[in-house]
Image: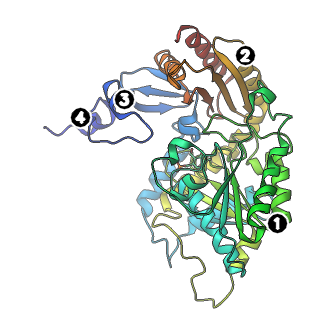
């Protein structure tokens, strides 16, 4: 096979789609009908066949500042030229320390230390390991049990799938971590269907944590991990008072509370973090995605002072935490992170998301009553439209709508029979109208 030109590699249909084994994708049908994107600017992607597509999903919930930001491009390319890599262990570079210092300034309370990773999955596994090691460092090494939640998504590492609650992500992979329990998820359509923002019903579901404490004893439980808003299983907005209750029960029993803010971090709710939005202070917070606007992979874990301090004991020349990645605090990712934080601030994007939220809410709920829609829900710039599944064909109806929207120039995301939306925070009202109209039309045409 002849070598392709450099431009062709990036801009035209590949000769051979077979060797790339894609994740979370039906490979065979995708390769028969591939959907390839070749460039992006502002609110739009351009497809390999030259069509412009509105991005209703910020890529995969990550491109919060919109596409093609020159400030990020310049910072990244300058850093590749200056120094593409520095060892992450026993050595450092200024930009990583500077970024950690900027990040803790953004985070309220005493979540004042940052451990760098390369993805949301790594952030989750890092947070779980820190929680276990924290208790051990304090002489409470029996606290080994981890508690997640049904319908939770915490990435794809063994820690993340163990505490996660999506059956397809778990059932193929054996026994996973031992000593894991799950709280019930917080969604009940009969009690909260078509809620605008946080549902009134459901705070009591947090009490299930007391049941698990009664079963195992608190002296065996290390941490509880939840997404403040469970996004990947279809936008399950926490009932009013639920997160506050979880916090109180964790405090009562000395259990660490971890918020997985891989999606909710960096403005998605119209506040810097869900920690700000809900006014609930966890002990560890995981982030990724919006940290670098998706431009370069990067994740991070915020830890409260008491957690960090528990490790800073013993001889000063001893390593305190036997954990880290070759690319922790990668110089190029740090450059992207700095540029992205500048953009968020300069453009006031978190405030913008807050201002647009009521319009977004109204737009999402305008689909109540649309064909086959059984629920609509929203928070910040996140929205979900749940469809009645086709008989004996779960997911097929939503996927049909996805394909129709794509053909009409709108990128949406579906999970099960739920359409999940999360546009870049630069979205204009006219884009919101277009996204909703296109979904409405597609619903009318779909099976
Ligand atoms: C809440 C949450 N945690 C973790 C992850 C995993 O992130 P990544 O795909 O970067 O590993 C995701 C990804 O969507 C997520 O939504």
Q: Is residue 431 visible in this depiction of the protein?
A: yes
Compared across the picture, whether 359 is left or right of 321 comes to right
Residue ID at (48%, 20%): 406
Q: Are marks 2 and 1 in contact (CB under 8 Å)?
A: no
Q: Which residue is mark 2?
A: 368
SS category of the residue bearing label 4: loop
Q: Mark 1 or mark 3, which has the lower sequence index?
A: 3
Give how far across and how far down residue 273 sits, in percent.
73, 48
Q: Which residue is mark 4?
A: 16
Determine the residue located farthest toward the left in the rendered image: 1
SS category of the residue bearing label 1: helix
Q: Which residue is mark 3?
A: 30
Q: Mark 2 or mark 1, which has the lower sequence index?
A: 1
Q: Nearer the viewer, residue 75 or 447?
A: 447
Q: Mark 1 or mark 4, which has the lower sequence index?
A: 4
Does mark 2's beta carbon lie closer than 8 Å to ligand 1? no
Q: Quadrant of the N terminus?
A: top left
Residue ID at (85%, 51%): 244
Q: CA distance from mark 1 to mark 3?
A: 48 Å
SS category of the residue bearing label 3: helix
Name the mark nearer the viewer: 4 or 3: 3
Q: Which residue is mark 1?
A: 253
Q: CA distance from mark 2 to mark 1?
A: 42 Å
Q: Mark 3 or mark 2, which has the lower sequence index?
A: 3
Q: Circle 1: is it few (<14), some (14-19), or many (20+) Cα within 10 Å?
A: some
């Amino acid at each position: 096979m002849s070598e392709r030109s450099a431009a062709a590699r990036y801009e035209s249909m590949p000769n051979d789609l077979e060797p790339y084994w894609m994740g979370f994708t039906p490979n065979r049908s995708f390769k028969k009908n591939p959907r390839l994107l070749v460039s992006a600017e502002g609110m739009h992607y351009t497809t390999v066949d030259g069509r412009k597509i509105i991005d209703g999903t910020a890529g995969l919930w990550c491109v919060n500042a919109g596409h093609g930001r020159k400030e990020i491009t310049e910072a990244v390319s300058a850093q590749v030229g200056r120094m593409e890599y520095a060892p992450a262990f026993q050595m450092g570079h200024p930009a990583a320390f500077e970024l950690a210092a900027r990040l803790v300034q953004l985070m309220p309370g005493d979540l004042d230390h940052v451990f760098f990773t390369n993805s949301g999955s790594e952030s989750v596994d890092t947070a779980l390991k820190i929680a276990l090691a924290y208790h051990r460092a304090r002489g409470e090494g029996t606290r080994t049990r981890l508690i997640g939640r049904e319908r939770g998504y915490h990435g794809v590492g063994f820690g993340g799938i163990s505490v996660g609650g999506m059956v397809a992500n778990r059932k193929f992979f054996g026994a996973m971590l031992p000593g894991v329990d799950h709280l019930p998820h917080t969604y009940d359509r009969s009690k909260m269907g078509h809620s605008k923002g946080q549902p009134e019903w459901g705070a009591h579901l947090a009490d299930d944590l007391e049941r698990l404490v009664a079963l195992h004893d608190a002296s065996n439980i290390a941490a509880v991990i939840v997404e403040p808003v469970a996004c990947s299983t279809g936008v399950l907005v926490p009932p009013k008072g639920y997160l506050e209750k979880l916090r109180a029960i964790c405090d009562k029993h000395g259990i660490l509370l971890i918020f997985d803010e891989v999606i909710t971090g960096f403005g998605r709710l119209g506040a810097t973090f869900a920690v700000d939005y809900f006014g609930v202070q966890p002990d560890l917070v995981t982030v990724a995605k919006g940290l670098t606007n998706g431009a370069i992979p990067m994740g991070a874990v915020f830890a409260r002072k008491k957690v960090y301090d528990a490790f800073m004991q013993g001889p000063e020349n001893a390593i305190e935490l036997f954990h880290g990645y070759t690319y922790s605090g990668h110089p190029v990712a740090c450059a992207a992170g700095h540029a992205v934080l500048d953009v968020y601030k300069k453009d006031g994007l978190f405030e913008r998301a807050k201002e647009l939220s009521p319009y977004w809410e109204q737009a999402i709920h305008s689909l109540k009553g649309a064909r086959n829609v059984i629920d609509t829900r929203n928070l910040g710039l996140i929205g979900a439209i749940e469809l009645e599944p086709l008989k004996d064909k779960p997911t097929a109806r939503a996927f049909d709508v996805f394909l129709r929207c794509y053909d009409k120039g709108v990128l949406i995301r579906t999970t099960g029979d739920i359409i999940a939306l999360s546009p870049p925070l630069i979205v204009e009202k006219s884009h919101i109208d277009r996204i909703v109209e296109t979904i409405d039309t597609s619903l009318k045409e779909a099976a």
